[in-house]
Image: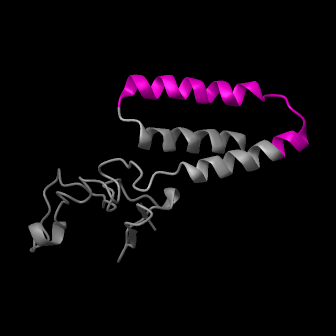
Amino acid sequence: QVGRLYRKSLKTLSSWVIDRDIFLEEATKLRNRFDEERGCSNAKAVRLLKEGKAELHEFTHPDPYCVPFMPGGSLFMRNPPPPLEICFPDGNYPADAPKHTLNPDMSVCRPETGKVAVGSVLVDFGKKNME
């Protein structure tokens, strides 16, 4: 849980800080805050986690940064490739034609990752994710 809180804190920090040098400086301060309490008792750890989650909620950015090609980003589905059925209506695909389909975030559809865009895909622009 501490690792997740630290990771979310860094992501929230990256939404607030634009300059990389300032981000690295603030990230070091954040890491020091986490390292100061390393090895504390369980009761104190539970209290610190609760306080940390409250502080993270307080500093949550209203419009968090997202990768440009992900849902909510400026490049999301900007140039999606047309389906092969439209490019080659006769069904004669060239040998070098891609044999995979793409998700709306332009990643390759793979059943093992759980991201398979078959049919309609719900893109939640409020949460900026693809479900």
Q: Is residue 13 above or below residue 71?
A: above
**Depth order, front residue of 53/71:** 53
Q: Residue at x 42, y 51 (%)?
A: 64
Prevailing SS of the magenta stretch: helix
Q: Position of 2 compared to 103: left or right? A: right
> Range of the magenta residues?
19-46
**Depth order, front residue of 93/115:** 115
Q: Position of residue 5 (x, y in %)?
A: 65, 44
Q: Position of residue 95 (x, y in %)?
A: 16, 53
Q: Position of 113 compared to 64: left or right? A: right
Q: Is residue 96 above or below residue 87?
A: above
Q: Position of residue 112 (x, y in %)?
A: 52, 57
Q: Position of residue 4 (x, y in %)?
A: 64, 44
Q: Position of 15 compared to 90: left or right? A: right
Task: Place residue 72 in its image quadrant.
Answer: bottom left
Q: Residue at x 14, y 62 (%)?
A: 93
Colouring method of the image: one colour
**Depth order, front residue of 78/52:** 52
Q: Is residue 128 magenta?
A: no
